[in-house]
Image (tube, coloured by chain):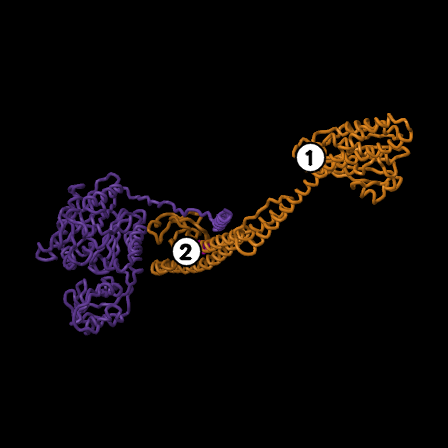
């Protein structure tokens, strides 16, 4: 008994001496909602990662309707990953809003809204609905396979879009979602209709594994190899920005032999060898001595892309980023995701995932400045981000991207991850490039 | 002592471990402070460059147990954070500081040390801040593990010490205590002790020897009691055998003397009668003393008014006192009660009065007084007679001792004071003599228990 008593006393002392320090609970105050001064435009953004198209659409629409505050959207943008059946998604959306102008496409791995970075093996869906007294939307599209060329498909798409808008004249800005591979031709077709001075912004539809599962959405139509456009007519302010953000390195040369989207020679030397030398072997050095076969260099080349050096009519130099996709070790050519031609100057660029992630605030900031829009005036944004650069960002850092965008523009937005980006560069015109990000803000 | 030792050890160990963990905690904190400084500088540089240092922040977060970090503008808005849920929220004013500060907080169920580092980015005269929280769990876990191990060890030691203490107690201390208690009991007269110890070695040997000794003592006591009993029986029998012939002699001789006409024969017969009466008194007193010595004789103890007994005795001896011209002073107060056998008390006082008279052959003063002292009553019987020498004071209570040996005092058997002593001792008191010397009188003092209502106060 005495022994037991002694033990109990000992343990009690120890527990007392262990020390119990009172600490306060760490609390943060709720988010301060930006008061949107734009009372002519109602925008709602919704998202879902639920399994099943019906439930996903139902949830996303429900969240979207909170932002619309009772207004029925006249225009909906929908981006989703290929884990969902796109056709069923479209059907479900149209069940909620028959006759709404619906535009969108598939995104790689995830979608974005102001609420965050949405990804799931079930699929990810984002929708943005807009009702505005000051904006007219027209959606059009075309299947490339149904046309003689991608150029004709572009023409047909914009024509339909303008027609659906019910207005004459050139739109103030055009949104585009195209199938990868023919972006330059499509842009040419669009420009034939609306001219070269109307900004066209968007991205090439993507899938998760570059297997061709991408889709484009035009109202009730879903294309596998098509183009979907939205013609926007508005008196509101429009801001936009389009950039890759990479650092320009000193290494540069002239494409001396190329074909389509393949560079054979730079400065008369095998392109692969020149590129390998420029990158000090960091991209495919260990394969450089092989003389046959093909090596995919997408991932490493994300940090060492090339850029077409272009001088605009404003005499300013612009860099159109090019993503090297693979190297043919036999002919030492490099396959890229943009059209190239002999005589074009190319320069090496370099970037880190930090640079790429920071674009989430620098690009929107430039767009606001371009449109002379104050943060509180922004009604909505549409954000395009290259899928290749997304995958270069560590997975645990990706959720910062929409937070940076939302923090900068202070308004609802929808974002997608693409396999090519199209945008307007002052002094150059509409271009297609890789590894870029863009944003269109309306305020 | 054991409890105190264990407690002291526990407290000392706890203090040591806690001090060690505090020191470790401080070292860790300094490291995190440095890290917060580096992260803050990178944020300041990033702000100027227009590019947030996500790589640096990401790398830094991999080190240690960083729970979260955030950057808050001067209005509290969080514009960068490791946790996406924190973006856009507001940092409460209380966390802002112009100097680097630390505090403990609770975050997602864990204790976190929060470092607030002001940034060199200002808005409206107020700094932005960088906050970093790191988990104290490793330090707390390490400390708790140390404490747990220390106290487990201490507990084991305590258990082992307890077992050892128990074994020691059972095999050594307890047996010795048993033997000690038994020895005390034997010293108090209880010879029925027997120690049963189940152990080995010297302790058991000691116990066996003790038991043997007690057994021998018990046998000797029994033998002694037997002899005493035989002695008492002998004395009793002898007394009766002596008293038997003396009784008719003392009864018949007065009749013969009365009828004797010859004066010379009458004188001779008076001598015989006086000797017969002396013999009879001697036998009676001897028997009385034997009876008092017998353990079977009990006293009839009750509440007795001392003053009343004294008055009775003086009254019974008034002729003797008057005849011997003895002045009597009875100073015993009426409120003194003793626990005593009243008849035997009377016998004591009667013997002392008789003795005092003998000591004052030319008359004198007899003073009887009493006072309460330490739960007893002390009675003083004082005379102004022949006094006592030092030797006489010591011996007057001895059997057959007579002060004046030159005279054959047939009125005294030499056992009177011995009988008084025995009676007083049976009452649990004591008796002694005081005198300032020859011809200066003497005082016989004795004590009796003061009467109280506590019936447990019984004289042995």
Q: Is residue B20 above or below residue A138?
A: below
Residue B265 lies left or right of residue B349; in this view the side is: right
Task: Find numbered disc 1 in the image and state the secondary structure of the residue it sits on.
Answer: loop
How many marks are shown on the rendered structure?
2
**Residue A354 position within the rendered picture, expressed as x and y whole percent measured from the top left:** 31, 60
Residue A76: percent from left, percent from top: 20, 46
- Residue B194, horizontal then vertical, whole percent: 57, 47
The quadrant holding residue B429 is top right
Q: Is residue A163 part of the magenta span, yes or no?
A: no
* Relative horizontal placement of residue A208, taking residue B213 as reference (left or right): left
Chain B's colour? Answer: orange
> Is A239 located above or below residue B278 in the figure?
below
Name the mark on residue A321.
none
Secondary element type, mark 2: helix
**Could you say where residue B129 lies in the image, as x and y percent from the top left?**
42, 53
Numbered range of the magenta stretch: B134-147
Q: Nearer the viewer, residue B187 or A319?
A: B187
* Secondary structure mainly formed by the magenta segment: helix
How many residues crowd mark 2 within 10 Å: few (<14), some (14–19), many (20+)?
Answer: few
Q: Nearer the viewer, residue B312 or A55?
A: B312
Q: Nearer the viewer, residue A13 or A161?
A: A13
Residue A315 in view: no
- Chain shaded purple: A
Task: Chain letter for mark 1, please.
Answer: B
Chain for disc number 2: B
- Please say whether residue B35 is visible from this viewpoint: yes
Label 1 sits on residue: B297
Q: Earlier in the sequence, mark 2 or mark 1?
A: 2
Label 2 sits on residue: B138
Q: Residue at x 68, y 43 (%)?
A: B227
Separation of marks 2 and 1 at Cα, in angstroms: 87 Å
């Amino acid at each position: 008994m005495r022994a037991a008593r002694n033990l109990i006393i000992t343990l009690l002392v120890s527990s007392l001496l262990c020390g119990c320090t009172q600490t306060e609970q760490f609390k943060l105050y709720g988010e301060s909602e930006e008061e949107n001064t734009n009372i002519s435009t109602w925008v709602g953004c919704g998202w879902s990662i639920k399994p099943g198209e019906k439930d996903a659409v139902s949830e996303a629409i429900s969240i979207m309707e909170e932002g619309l505050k009772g207004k029925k959207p006249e225009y909906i943008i929908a981006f989703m990953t290929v884990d969902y059946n796109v056709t069923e998604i479209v059907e479900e959306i149209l069940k909620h809003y028959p006759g709404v102008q619906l535009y969108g496409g598939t995104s790689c791995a995830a979608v974005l809204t102001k609420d965050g970075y949405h990804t799931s093996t079930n699929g990810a869906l984002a929708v943005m609905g807009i009702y505005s007294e000051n904006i007219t939307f027209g959606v059009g599209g075309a299947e490339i396979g149904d046309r003689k060329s991608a150029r004709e498909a572009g023409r047909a798409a914009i024509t339909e879009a303008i027609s659906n808008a019910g207005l004459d004249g050139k739109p103030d800005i055009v949104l585009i979602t195209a199938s990868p591979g023919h972006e330059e031709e499509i842009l040419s077709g669009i420009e034939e209709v609306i001219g070269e001075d109307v900004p066209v912004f968007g991205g090439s539809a993507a899938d998760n594994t570059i297997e061709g599962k991408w889709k484009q959405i035009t109202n009730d139509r879903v294309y596998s190899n098509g183009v979907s456009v939205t013609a926007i007519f508005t008196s509101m302010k429009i801001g936009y920005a389009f950039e890759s953000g990479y650092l320009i390195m000193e290494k540069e040369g002239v494409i001396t032999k190329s074909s389509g989207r393949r560079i054979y020679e730079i400065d008369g030397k095998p392109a692969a060898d020149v590129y390998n030398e420029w990158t000090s072997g960091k991209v495919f050095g260990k394969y450089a001595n092989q003389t046959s076969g093909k090596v995919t260099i997408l991932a490493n080349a994300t940090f060492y892309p090339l850029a077409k050096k272009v001088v605009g009519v404003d005499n300013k130099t612009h860099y159109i980023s090019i993503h090297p996709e693979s190297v043919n070790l036999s002919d030492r050519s490099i396959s890229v995701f943009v059209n190239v031609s002999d005589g074009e100057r190319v320069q090496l660029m370099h970037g880190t995932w930090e640079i790429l992630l920071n674009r989430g605030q620098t690009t929107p900031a430039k767009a606001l400045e371009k449109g002379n829009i104050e943060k509180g005036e922004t009604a909505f944004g549409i954000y395009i981000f290259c899928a290749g650069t997304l995958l270069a960002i560590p997975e645990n850092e990706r959720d910062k991207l929409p937070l940076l965008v939302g923090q900068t523009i202070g308004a609802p937005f929808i974002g997608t991850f693409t396999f090519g980006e199209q945008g307007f560069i002052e002094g150059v015109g509409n271009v297609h490039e890789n590894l870029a990000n863009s944003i269109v803000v309306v305020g | 002592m054991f409890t105190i030792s264990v407690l002291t050890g526990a407290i000392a160990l706890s203090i040591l471990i806690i001090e060690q963990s505090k020191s470790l905690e401080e070292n860790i904190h300094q490291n995190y402070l440095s890290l917060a400084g580096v992260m803050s500088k990178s944020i300041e540089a990033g702000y100027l460059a227009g590019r947030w240092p996500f790589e640096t922040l990401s790398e830094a977060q991999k080190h240690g147990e960083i729970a979260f970090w955030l950057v808050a503008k001067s209005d509290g808005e969080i514009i960068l954070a490791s946790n996406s849920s924190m973006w856009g929220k507001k940092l409460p004013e209380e966390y802002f500081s112009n100097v680097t500060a630390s505090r403990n907080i609770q975050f997602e169920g864990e204790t976190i040390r929060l470092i607030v580092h002001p940034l060199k980015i200002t808005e409206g005269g107020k700094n932005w801040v960088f906050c970093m929280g790191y988990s104290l769990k490793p330090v707390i876990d390490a400390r708790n593990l140390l404490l747990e191990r220390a106290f487990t060890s201490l507990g084991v030691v305590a258990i082992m010490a307890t077992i050892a203490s128990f074994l020691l107690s059972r095999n050594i201390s307890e047996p010795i205590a048993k033997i000690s208690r038994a020895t005390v009991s034997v010293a108090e007269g209880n010879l029925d002790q027997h120690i049963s110890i189940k152990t080995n070695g010297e302790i058991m040997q000691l116990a066996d020897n003790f038991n043997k000794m007690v057994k021998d003592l018990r046998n000797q006591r029994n033998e002694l009691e037997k002899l005493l009993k035989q002695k008492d029986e002998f004395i009793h029998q002898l007394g009766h055998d002596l008293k038997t012939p003396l009784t008719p002699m003392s009864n018949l001789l007065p009749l013969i003397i009365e009828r004797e006409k010859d004066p010379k024969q009458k004188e001779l017969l008076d001598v015989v009668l006086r000797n017969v009466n002396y013999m009879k008194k001697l036998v009676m007193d001897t028997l009385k003393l034997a009876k008092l010595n017998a353990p079977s004789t009990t006293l009839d103890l009750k509440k007795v008014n001392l003053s009343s007994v004294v008055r009775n005795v003086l009254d019974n001896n008034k002729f003797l006192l008057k005849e011997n011209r003895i002045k009597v002073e009875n100073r015993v107060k009426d409120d003194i009660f003793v626990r005593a056998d009243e008849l035997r008390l009377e016998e004591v006082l009667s013997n002392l009065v008789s003795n005092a008279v003998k000591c004052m052959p030319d008359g004198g003063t007899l003073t009887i007084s009493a006072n309460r002292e330490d739960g007893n009553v002390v009675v003083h019987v004082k005379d102004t007679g022949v006094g006592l020498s030092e030797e006489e004071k010591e011996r007057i209570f001895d059997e057959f001792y007579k002060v004046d040996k030159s005279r054959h005092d047939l009125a005294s058997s030499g056992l009177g004071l011995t009988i008084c002593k025995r009676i007083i001792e049976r009452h649990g008191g004591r008796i002694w003599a005081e005198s300032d010397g020859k011809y200066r009188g003497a005082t016989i003092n004795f004590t009796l228990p003061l009467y109280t209502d506590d019936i447990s106060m019984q004289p042995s």
